């Protein structure tokens, strides 16, 4: 359905800085890929290219067999969860989750079904009429995930979604994310700088450094190497 393949992908920013220097990654359908590496090594750039939010200088990214740049943004079956939850403060939880679907002119009845289903999965059923400020950090993070889930994407992209949460919540949410991804059988690419998060979440771990892939493989193999 939605394997994500990067072939010799490069990114040169205007000004000439080469942020990504020829990266090859293959994420199978339903797999969870985690990108780790020091700040500035190119993780966000790579993720944003997969999302189609950043141009690719050379090489190719395809999703489910289609080249990303050839897919109209509105047709891209991708949803991204950011670390700043990006919720609309003046809107209720329900409307925050419905917003993207309304932009796509989906019928209200279908929106209602999707929002209520997502709320049930995320245990936000009783929170739908609240505003973001009336929620805890973990609840807000779940609303942000809800906004992604209702789109029923084939690919989930996460850019350090838990780094604003306290340690206890981070562990709880980590478990939630993994359960959710298995349940929805969605392909995921997840950026973090937290090794424990990477260990628990990854089917495939990609260690990046200086715009290149330094290591790629099973997290147990990678972390056990001397
Ligand atoms: P990471 O997510 O691993 O911290 P980024 O992908 O954000 O890394 O950045 C990779 C490199 O590209 C960094 O050196 C950063 O300064 C540079 N960079 C990021 N965005 C831009 C931009 N819009 N223009 C020029 N350079 C950028
Ligand atoms: P949202 O669904 O996040 O409320 P919009 O409906 O305003 O956003 O989205 C406009 C276009 O931008 C969408 O068609 C989508 O392809 C792209 N886009 C928006 N948000 C994201 C995201 N979080 N990740 C990837 N692409 C996005």
Image: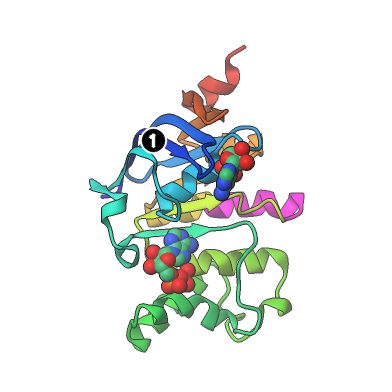
* Farthest-out residue, front: 15
Q: Quadrant of the C terminus?
A: top right
Reading the image, the residue beneath label 1 is 9
Q: Quadrant of residue 108?
A: bottom left
- Label 1: which secondary element: strand
Estimate the x, y position of residue 87 in percent, counting from the top left.
60, 72
> Which residues are the magenta region?
165-177
Estimate the x, y position of residue 175 in percent, counting from the top left.
58, 50
Residue 153 within the segment the image draws in magenta:
no
Is the CB atom of the residue marked by disc 1 within 8 angstroms of ligand 1's nearest atom? no
**What residue sits 52% from the left and 83% below the top?**
95
* Colouring mode (rainbow / by chain / secondary structure / one colour): rainbow
Relative to 207, is 182 above or below? below
Q: Is residue 74 visible?
A: yes
Relative to 165, is 28 above or below? above
Using the image as rendered, state which of residue 201 and residue 190 is in the foreground.
190
Estimate the x, y position of residue 124 in percent, counting from the top left.
58, 74
Using the image as rendered, state which of residue 67 and residue 137 is in the foreground.
67
Residue 174 within the segment the image draws in magenta:
yes
Crowding around mark 1 (Cα neighbors within 10 Å: few <14, some 14 to 19, many 20+) is: many
Estimate the x, y position of residue 26 in percent, counting from the top left.
35, 34
Q: Quadrant of residue 3?
A: top left
């Amino acid at each position: 359905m939605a394997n994500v393949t990067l072939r010799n992908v490069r990114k040169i920013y205007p000004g000439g800085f080469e942020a990504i220097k020829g990266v090859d990654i293959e994420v199978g359908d339903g797999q969870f890929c985690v990108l780790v590496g020091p700040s500035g090594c190119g993780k966000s750039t790579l993720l944003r290219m997969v999302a189609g939010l950043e141009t690719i200088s050379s090489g190719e990214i395809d999703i489910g067999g289609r080249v990303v740049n050839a897919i109209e943004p509105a047709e891209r079956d991708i949803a991204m969860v950011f670390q700043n939850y990006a919720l609309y403060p003046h809107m209720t939880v329900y409307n925050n989750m419905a917003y993207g679907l309304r932009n796509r002119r989906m019928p209200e009845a279908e929106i209602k079904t999707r929002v209520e289903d997502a709320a049930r999965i995320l245990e936000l059923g009783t929170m739908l009429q609240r505003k973001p400020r009336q929620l805890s950090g973990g609840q807000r993070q779940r609303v942000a995930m809800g906004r992604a889930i209702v789109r029923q994407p084939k690919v989930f992209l996460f850019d350090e979604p838990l780094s604003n949460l306290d340690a206890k919540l981070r562990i709880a949410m980590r478990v939630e994310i993994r359960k959710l991804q298995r349940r929805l059988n969605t392909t995921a690419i997840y950026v973090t700088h937290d090794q424990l998060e990477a260990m628990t979440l990854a089917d495939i771990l990609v260690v990046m450094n200086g715009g290149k892939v330094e290591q790629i493989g099973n997290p147990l193999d990678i972390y056990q190497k001397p």
